[in-house]
Image: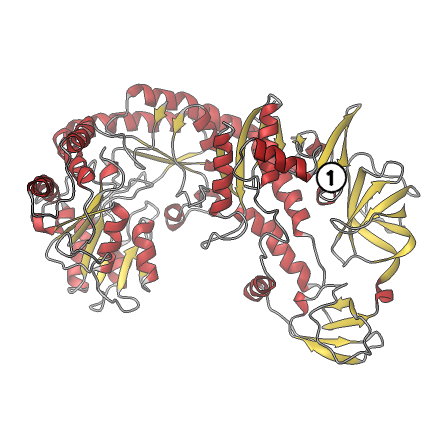
Amino acid sequence: MAYLDNAAGAPLRPEAAAAIRAATDSGLTNPSGAHAAARRARDAIDAARDTVAAALGVDAAGVVFTSGGTEADNLAVGAAGSARTGALVCSAIEHHAVLRPVLAAGGRTVAVTGEGVVDLARLDEALDPKVALVSVMAANNETGAIQPLDEVVAIVRAKAPGAVVHTDAVQALPWMALSGALSPVARCDLVAISAHKIGGPAGVGALATRGVPVRPLLLGGGQERGRRSGTPNVTGILAMAAAMRAATEQRADEVARVRALRDRLEEGLAEAIDGVTVSAAGAERLVGHCHLTIDGVESEALLVLLDEAGIAASGGAACASGALDPSHVLLAMGATPAQARSGLRLSLGWATTASEVDKALDVVPKAVGNLRRHSRRIGAGVL
Amino acid sequence: MRVLVAMSGGVDSSVAAARAVADGHEVVGATMKLWGGESDSGCCSVADADDARRVAAQIGISHHVFNFSDDFDAQVVAPYIAEHALGRTPNPCIECNRHLKFDRFLVRARSLGFDAVATGHHARVVEEGGCFRLRRGRDAAKDQSYVLSMLGQAQLAHCLFPVGVLTKDDVRSEARRLGLRTAAKPDSLGTCFLPSAQSRRELFARRAALHPATVQDADGTPVGRVDALELVTVGQRRGICVLATGGKRRYVTAVDAVRRTVTLGGRDDLLVGELELTDLTWVAAAVDPGTPVLAQQSAHGVPVPAVLTTRTHDAGGKSATVRFDQPVVRAAPGQTVALYDARDPDVLCGAGIAR
């Protein structure tokens, strides 16, 4: 088995697994209560909140724990209040967790370049003082293209000084520092993250806020300072914090190691397969992402062969029925519908080994060859 | 053999998959997403794909979902709308079988290294001396050979219909015996992308212009109006509001998209002695002119004795005339006429499209 779908979800880190066991063993329960057991849970969450706050460069009070990246993004988009039509702006390649709520509120998208990077001139044109929120992801989930957040923030401050800047940093989290003077993410007002991309459990995430009030999506007991009612996922939050601590400590080593593996994989595939285009090759990219389009090969078919051969990879965005839709990211980058159906994302993570890369280098070219030999319609010849 | 089973999430294809496994094949299941869009409701819904996936898990095979919605739209839905605009009534299930299940899906299966595809259709493929024959399914009431009538040797060589030898009751009891969650799921009815008359009107209104037309008697006397000629079909009886006509049943006998007229008449006005067929396909060898056949004009229509004759303008063997022994109520233009062997009425010879 070669697990090359880390951008969808990375394997649980041992530190996170240990945190889950510890939380379970110590019987942590509802932190809202006037007794010792509740206080223990609350103390544990406070410590986790400090960890997350430090990683995201915000005050502990600025961290809202959520059920994951989607909820954090929705919470962020909702922070603009009852926005007028056109008051919300996001890039055309945002994750659907941003794109759908922005469009549902009458918002607009900003085009990207052929390299999958938000077009700053178009962003500049799209902004005016009436814009209430601008959302541009830190790095794209399909191509891994890192977005020019420094410039985005500068343009927003100049053209729409009242606007809140949100960034979906779900994909960037494993690979980039999100705090400190050098991080453009640290200049955004709102930052969404998710635990399972860094080896935490699925179903937990956070929104970091820098002085921006958010309107709750969930009303109830007023947890998370009224910003997110509902008993918090104590175990998940502790495991997320443990995964973030481990990821932060090991980031420098992991980035170097994974970059070398990714480059070997990408160069090997480009050499072994005709008609391969590396997506966003001209952009700065996350080190874990290898995204290719392969001429004449539908990703849906390729993924079946890869799955049979024990390789977990991904095509475009899977819809609820499990079907692959043509990638809106590739379409926004100027791909034809056929090209938008021929994307292959091999994404590496903290646990990826050299032998997994070797396996992909062996299997993917063979699978592509098999598909190309047989991809004929009945009208065109014998089956 | 390596077999890819097209699993719709219904009971027939569930049992087809189970039988393919029981027959010792190496089986994988796949569900085609053909329609649904954002709402993802109705046919090819998430719930149906989930049923297929869970049945696949239950019988121990892997399962994939193929998104062929663009192809379905281009090759089934768009032509359906375009034909209706010309006053014709195509059969979308047959076009889906022709272009999707037994072309797109079959080619996908072959490219993935499968020897054959299996579906839950009630029909039988029999090999006789290197020639594949298509026979009606065992259950006359559920027989689906009509909607498969455009298949030829290229497809049949790679097709399995595992439930064709069963009655529908057998299928359901086998599903119950295996504990499949689809055992009691109702049969799908009607056209998958048109769950209601209202959705049909909405689809046409969204995708093409709707044109009002004059409703006239056989002699051309105007008797009323319809607001959408595109929604009227030859042979239709209900839904046309006209002045009282003396209690006689009135049928649509012609739809003229150019003159924007809908002509009404009695049942006798729908009777024809022959029909011209286009786009002829043959399961195996073409039937010689003059050969007696049994012509069936709808999925569960009565097969009637007829003779196939060719015409001088016969376009490369792709068109012919079917002459009925007795006048019959005609199929609407655009409908498929399936031709069965007069000597062996379960055997399908081929099909054409009524002009």
Across and down, in percent, residue B218 comes to 84, 74
| Residue B63 screen position, x and y as percent | 49, 33
| Residue occupied by mark 1 | B139
Q: Badge 1: few (under 14), some or many (20 or more) residues near its Cα, within 10 Å?
A: some
Up the image or down, B179 lies above or below A66; here it is above
Looking at the image, which is closer to me, B94 or B342?
B342
User: Relative to A359, does residue A102 appear above or below in the rendering?
Assistant: below
Residue at x 88% of width, y 43% of height:
B293
In the figure, residue A365 lies in which quadrant? top left
Residue A48 appears anywhere in the view: yes
| Amino acid type for the residue under numbered disc 1 | Asp
**Would residue B73 be found to the left or right of residue B162 on screen?**
left
The quarter of the displayed image where residue A127 is located: bottom left
Q: Quadrant of residue A327?
A: top left
Q: The disc numbered 1 marks a residue on which chain? A: B
Image check: A119 left or right of B292? left
Point 75% across, 71% down: residue: B262
The colour scheme applied to this rendered structure is: secondary structure
The residue drawn where x is 31% and y is 63% is A105
**Residue at the image point whose x is 58% and y is 57% from the top:** B195
